[in-house]
Amino acid sequence: MAKSPAKPVKPALASRAVFYRRLRRNGQVAAGLIALSLAVGVGGYHWLGGLAWIDAFQNAAMILSGMGPVDPLTSSGAKFFAGCYALYSGLALIATATLAMAPILHRLFHSFHLEDSPDAS
């Protein structure tokens, strides 16, 4: 008697604890990326742009959030930094949104591949 080929075993959906751990880890990485990006922006605006710390923070936060600059910059180095920081900030915004959404989308897509019943074909 020939054995029938075994059906591939589909892994079960991860537990809520695992899902929340993934959310927390990705959220921490995203928050770290934002904090590091903000620190670089504040430093650049302060040292290259000659802005006070609070004004440098405001400009960096506005650029990082996609709103745009607040104070005009006068030196070429500061303008070059601001342009590079703006380009980077656009990518950082996409990266942090991706990090935050990845566990949610992974769980959603994984749930589409679960079988409805153990004997479904």
Image: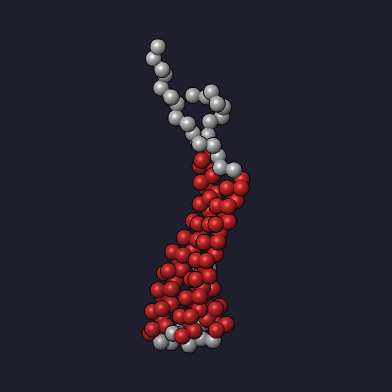
Q: Position of residue 43 (x, y in %)?
A: 48, 80
Q: Position of residue 97 (x, y in %)?
A: 51, 58
The one nearer the camera, 76 or 47, is: 47
Residue closest to the far right: 16
Q: Quadrant of residue 90?
A: bottom left
Q: Is residue 20 visible?
A: yes
The one nearer the camera, 79 or 6, is: 6
The residue positioned 54% from the left and 37% from the top of the image is 12
The one nearer the camera, 24 or 85, is: 24
Q: Tell me: residue 103, above or below residue 11.
A: below
Q: Position of residue 104 (x, y in %)?
A: 55, 49
Q: Tell me: residue 114, above or below residue 51.
A: above
Q: Is residue 70 visible?
A: no
The residue positioned 41% from the left and 22% from the top of the image is 5
Q: Position of residue 4 (x, y in %)?
A: 42, 19
Colour setting? secondary structure
Q: Tell me: residue 112, above or below residue 86.
A: above
Q: Quadrant of residue 77?
A: bottom left
The residue positioned 55% from the left and 78% from the top of the image is 57
